[in-house]
Amino acid sequence: MDTDTKLAERTTAHETVSLTGAQMVVRALKDQGVTHIFGYPGGAVLPIYDALFADNGIVHVLVRHEQGATHAAEGYARSTGKPGVVLVTSGPGATNAVTGLTDALMDSIPLVVLTGQVATHLIGTDAFQEADTVGITRACTKHNWLVKDVNELSRTLHEAFQIATQGRPGPVVVDIPKDVQFKTGDYFTPEQIRHRTFRPKTEPDQAAIARAVELMSEAKRPVLYTGGGIINAGPKASLALRELASLTGFPVTSTLMGLGAFPASSPQWLGMLGMHGTYEANNAMHDCDLMVCLGARFDDRVTGRIDAFSPGSKKIHLDIDASQINKVVRVDLPIVADAGRAISEMVKLWKAKGVKAQSIKDWWATIDSWRAKKCLAYQPSQSLIKPQYAIDRLYALTRGRDVYITTEVGQHQMWAAQRFKFEEPNRWMTSGGLGTMGYGLPAAVGVQMAHPGALVIDIAGEASVQMTMQEMSTAVQYDLPIKIFILNNQYMGMVRQWQELLHGGRYSHSYSEALPDFAKLADAFGCLGLFADKPRDLDDKIRQMIESPKPVLFDCRVDPAENCFPMIPSGAAHNDMILSGLSDAEVSDEGKMLV
Amino acid sequence: MAIERHTVTALVDNEAGVLARVVGLFSGRGYNIESLTVAEVDPKARTSRITIVTSGTPEVIEQIEAQLRRVVPVHAVTNWTFASDGIEREMALVKVTRPALKAAKATAEKFGARALDESGVFELTDAPAKISSFIEAMRDLGLSDVSRTGVAAISRDSE
């Protein structure tokens, strides 16, 4: 079959326009509703940049490193629910994007990454800035393509958006050789394209919904264990979750990725679960008789020791990705569907049948006794800024504002997750699955680009933030007043904590003996630098940060010895939480093998 | 948990890199491949069938099938091991040393293998276990080389 017949078969209409490959890229982005892209030019994408120059319908954000472009696109995507789009060149442009692609794959973030490639006749010759981009990115994308025929380009681009956004979202790469960008061919619109095989299942099986409602009506010690799938299913899914919780009266906990789907101000909220989750959330998971997992994937940070994970419970698992069912934990009732659709159906059936939940008063009394432990309490200090205090003050002083939070990775991330209370979805951007230091600053750039009037704060650590620091320059260029709130303890804090707890206090290479003067660095970038090392100065400085119309680097010097608790040590069960301080002896040898 | 051997097939779009996607999935997630066969089965629809013999606990096998179904160009995944109407065949070319040729011919006849010519190369198409027995029998006589195609599987169901 020749290409023309094949194309005709796969498209529903035959009216096309003739465009160059580069023009098709710009046209396809617009037809997909793209308004912002994050990118960096180079030899192999010059024709596309030329097409962008001739068109002012799309805002291009020039980053300083391609990793920054991918994280900015992730922040943009996570805060808007739209796909993030990235444009980079061949070779190093593509390889620099690999970390962001992997991050987006782990956290199910829809990204469409367009990479330039050397001309088709040069592929395989080790040409200048040639890399096997589809080979390198195969393992870190949901799907990828190398487009060698300009007549296939528009179809591929539209399919790329479809695959990135539908079903379980994820990153895709379209690799476009330079000669294909120059060539002229037929452009097809999104409506003319239908993928041959890709049909994600979104509608739940009604029998499974009925069984789920039945199990929920019988439960005496239930818990709703929610995750990022609810955020990805859109704001309606969060509303459905709230309704389900209010109908059933069940306690709600969430993974790191799911924070905001359920309001932290609700009396039914138990806080985050997992390794640094709350005592009440983890004990509820361990002792429940019914676990209703909604859009989460039993990550090892959540489960702790698998053979001691919630031993007495029946488990319902709702996931849009069938491969997540029984992957880590065997469940009693799988539901493969869109989280919003499935939860809405549960709510509908619960109401239609007039279901009365069991009395779970005793269960709430037990939960209240766990809450009474006040597991997030810490030892306050007059002389040193405790990191927990800094986050509490940041939270208090940003009330009443339109706040979005991003983070880097480490202790500060866990303190932020524990203490910053989210009421709505899409307000919390963090690298959960991959744990990418350097995520938060560029993610803040992407969030601020999408929400110009909002207060966008990156709760950062001084080690993480140096990994993608150069993107401050991007923030300055586009007048993005992002606030980089650095909890500076001069250590890779989580590494230091593990070395203290698991490696006999041998702090091997976790202390930064040389650090930049962040306030001066801020000056050099053309933004505002702030410094605080006394608790009594903190509020004023935070206010200055919030009020400033500029991007801000805030060097907040905190207690370098503070550890993040509570903690489930590696290889331990949910009910083996350490509330404050533990010794080497409490971690098994097997546990030490785990990360 | 007992390790089981399973034959799993995937009907895929015959597009660039599809085999690498499937093989990369196995290596990336630490699954075994005991044999792998791939060829286009419908040139008009441009679909290929990939047949993989793999081994693992029932949980791992379930994951392999689920992970294969996630691969975008995969149309369908079938596990033939417990399918009552499934049929598996493999072809082998087995070469014996010259002094063993006469005895080998007699053994080959018993197994239903065919001597291709007087070079000492025999061809046998059969269930994989029968092929293995044939090779073992030839080994005792004087085996010089073996080439196996890996398993192809199909359903007996006429639908």
Image (cartoon, coloured by chain):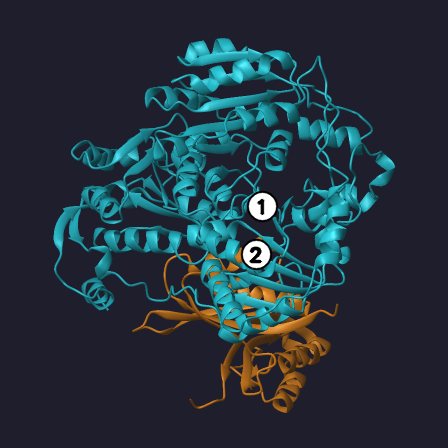
Tell me the colour chain A is drawn in.
cyan
Label 1–label 2 contact, CB within 8 A: yes
Q: Position of residue B136 (x, y in %)?
A: 70, 77
Q: Amino acid at mark 2?
A: Ala
- Left or right of B113 in this view: A22: left
Same chain check for tags 1 and 2: yes
State the quadrant of the C terminus of chain B. bottom left
Q: Amino acid at mark 1?
A: Ser
- Left or right of A418 in this view: A440: left
> Could you tell me which residue is drawn at 37 percent across and 58 percent down?
B16
Q: Quadrant of residue A537?
A: top right
Residue A306 seen by the camera? no
* In this view, A591 is above or below A472: below
Question: How many dots with numbers?
Answer: 2
Q: Helix, strand, or loop for circle 1? A: loop
> Could you tell me which residue is drawn at 51 percent across and 60 percent down?
A321
Res A245 label: 2
State the quadrant of the N terminus of chain B. bottom right
Q: What is the C-alpha distance between the residues marked 1 and 2?
A: 10 Å
Q: Position of residue A67 (x, y in %)?
A: 44, 33
- Left or right of A67 in this view: A302: right
